[in-house]
Amino acid sequence: MKEDKQKICDALLEAFKLTRERDNIVSIEYDVQTEMVCVLYASGFKMLINVAMDSGMAMISDIMKQIKY
């Protein structure tokens, strides 16, 4: 099964919107070419996360590790 990493990001965004701590995340976009995820906050701040060679679960883990700060 080929994982749809953008769909995983979309689902993760919906989960974050249900929380108090991360409801300020506007979008989570996966770039196939660079294998980077861009997390956009309501303030306009953008966080780039390298998810190269990640499985779907590893990508979720990497995103969670980075946004907790």
Image: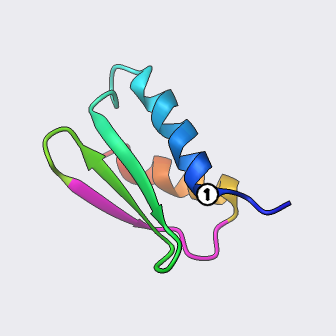
Image vertical order of residue 11 relative to residue 69, above or below: above
Q: Residue at x 34, y 19 (%)?
A: 20
Outermost residue on the bottom side: it is 33
Question: Which quadrant of the structure image shows residue 27?
Answer: top left
Looking at the image, residue 45 sits to the left or right of residue 51; the answer is left
Determine whether the residue tagged by mark 1 lies in a helix, strand or loop: helix
Question: Which quadrant of the structure image shows residue 36?
Answer: bottom left
Q: Residue at x 79, y 63 (%)?
A: 2
Residue 45 locus on image (x, y percent): 17, 51
Image vertical order of residue 29 relative to residue 43, above or below: below
* Residue 43 forms part of the magenta stretch: no
Q: Residue at x 34, y 52 (%)?
A: 39
**Residues drawn in magenta:** 46-54
* Residue 53 forms part of the magenta stretch: yes
Q: Residue at x 64, y 76 (%)?
A: 53
Image vertical order of residue 20 relative to residue 38, above or below: above
Disc 1: which residue: 5
**Type of the residue with mark 1:** Lys
Outermost residue on the right side: it is 1
Residue 10 locus on image (x, y percent): 52, 42
Residue 66 locus on image (x, y percent): 39, 54
